[in-house]
Amino acid sequence: MTQNDWRRRPWVQRTIIAGLVLVGFLAGWSGLWLATRRIVGTPAAVRKPKPTFDQAEVVSRPYSPWTAAGEEVELSWELDNTGDTTWTTDDYRFVPARDDLPVLSVPAAVLPGKHVRVKALLTAPETAGTWNVSWTLTGATRQVPGGHIDADVSVDAP
């Protein structure tokens, strides 16, 4: 059998030709598919934006202060903005759990990863006992997870 013996056998020729045609066909289609993916792809207008989320973490809480009935008491909390949205003074506020407490504002815009101190100046009730106060950080559309602040104030009799 010589080196060119394969040329005398038609089935060998047909097999080689069929293999080359198949390889070329597959290579052509895969190249065409890749080219259309690059050209067509997903348009930027159709792509969904990355969802944003609000998240807060209370870093410090006030100790449980003692105060006389009718006296003023200042409470402060420190929170970290652990989400990826900026808390603005227009859209974010601390909504009280009870009607006799004031709404607290976010003192300044808080960028993601930054820290804020929130203060409340309250007048203790006239009755002795433990007075629980609490607020929830609320954004433009919903409550911010982790944004609940509270304190227990012990009030002495007058």
Image (cartoon, rainbow, N blue to C red):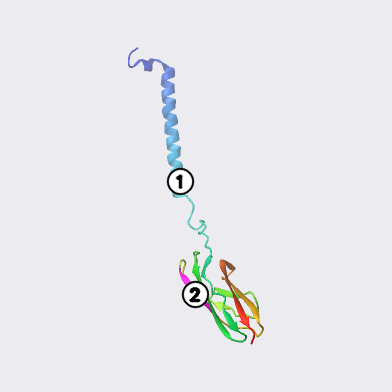
Nearer to us in this view, 21 or 102: 102
Q: Position of residue 38 (x, y in %)?
A: 44, 48
The residue at the point 46 percent across, 42 percent down is 33
Q: Position of residue 11 (x, y in %)?
A: 44, 18
Of the pair 87 and 118, the residue shown nearer to us: 118
Quarter placement of the N terminus: top left
Disc 1 marks which residue? 36
Q: Quadrant of residue 134?
A: bottom right
Residue 69 coordinates in the image, percent (x, y): 62, 85
Task: Say which amino acid is labelled 1.
Answer: Thr
**Residue 9 sits above or below residue 29 on the image:** above
Q: Is residue 80 visible to us here?
A: yes
Numbered disc in front, either 1 or 2: 2
Left or right: where 48 falls relative to 10? right
Q: Earlier in the sequence, mark 1 or mark 2?
A: 1
Magenta segment, which residues?
A: 114-120
Q: Is residue 110 visible?
A: no
Q: Counting other residues with Cα less than 10 Å from the Cα at mark 1, is it few (<14), some (14-19), or many (20 or more)? A: few
Q: Are marks 1 and 2 in contact (CB under 8 Å)?
A: no
- Residue ID at (44%, 26%): 18
Along the line of sight, the residue nearer the viewer: 126 or 150: 126
What label sits on residue 21 in the rendered view? none
Quadrant holding the C terminus? bottom right
Q: Which residue does the numbered mark 2 point to in the structure image?
A: 117
Q: Amino acid at mark 2?
A: Arg
Magenta span dominant secondary structure: strand
Outermost front residue: 157
**Is the residue 104 above or below the residue 39 in the image?**
below
Q: Secondary structure at mark 1?
A: helix
